[in-house]
Amino acid sequence: SLLYEIFVIIGVFLYIALMLELGSISIKFSEYRVLCLRAIEQIVLCFGVVFLVIFSFAFAINGMTREVENVTSEEWSDVGATTSTLIRLAFGAMDMVAVQSVASESPLLIVVIILFMMLIYSFFFNLLVSQFCGVQASLALDIKGHARLARGEIIIETFKAVKQKRWNKFMDSLHLDERVDFEEGDIGL
């Protein structure tokens, strides 16, 4: 049953990846696709920096051995538990009652935790929003060009997939080397 669920999840993600290619049907879809892909890049960069800060603070907190020993909660006992706790704090999944108990047991540790939360919430997540605005502003003027380039890449990849023999057969079927009869009034060559 677990294996089946894993394959279902993989299937859904593969289907979504295929749906992204439908963005090349229209310029508007392609523009939106380009904008979303640039936004995803910014999200990945932001989360990478957030996790780097989480690991840095986890090691710093575990370096404060006297303060950690004063806390009765097991959430700050080692690097793994501290990292897990900081991840839950960063993404708002931790009960604040546990943080309040730390405040009464270790004033220096709560200062470090508050500094961490201010850095994550006030700086990094606001920086992410400003990055979104910057991406939108930088792409706004020439997003059609980016969309056309993205569509061009798909066309080029499609051409690479066509065998030379098949391409030559298609070109021969067009009879482009034969003269065309013009209608009355047309200026021929």
Image (cartoon, grey):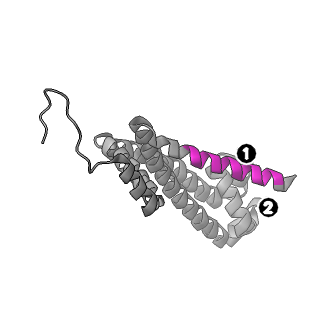
Q: Residue at x 54, y 52 (%)?
A: 120
- Amino acid type of the residue that numbered disc 2 sits on in the rendered structure: Glu
Q: Residue at x 73, y 45 (%)?
A: 95
Residue marked by disc 2: 74
Q: Are marks 1 and 2 in contact (CB under 8 Å)?
A: no
Q: Which residues are magenta?
A: 4-19
Q: Which mark is residue 95?
A: 1
Percent x, y of residue 20? 53, 45
Viewer-closest of 9 and 173: 173
Q: What number of labels is visible?
A: 2
Q: Dot 1 lies on which element? A: loop
Side of 107 where 25 appears, left or right: left
Cα gap from disc 1 to disc 2, whole angstroms: 14 Å
Residue 105, relative to residue 188: is it above or below? Answer: below
Residue density around tag 1, few if under 14, some if 14–19, many if 20 or more, within 10 Å: few
Residue 58, relative to residue 140: is it above or below? Answer: below
Percent x, y of residue 184? 16, 27
Percent x, y of residue 33? 46, 43
Percent x, y of residue 81? 74, 63
Based on the picture, tell me whether residue 10 belongs to the magenta stretch. Answer: yes
Viewer-closest of 142 and 99: 142
Viewer-closest of 79 and 125: 125
Of marks 1 and 2, which one's residue comes earlier in the chain? 2
Residue 130, relative to residue 53: is it above or below? Answer: above
Q: Dot 2 lies on which element? A: helix
Viewer-closest of 11 and 62: 11
Based on the picture, tell me whether residue 50 belongs to the magenta stretch. Answer: no
Residue placed furthest toward the right: 1
- Quadrant assignment, res 129: top left
- Amino acid type of the residue that numbered disc 1 sits on in the rendered structure: Asp
Residue placed furthest toward the top: 184
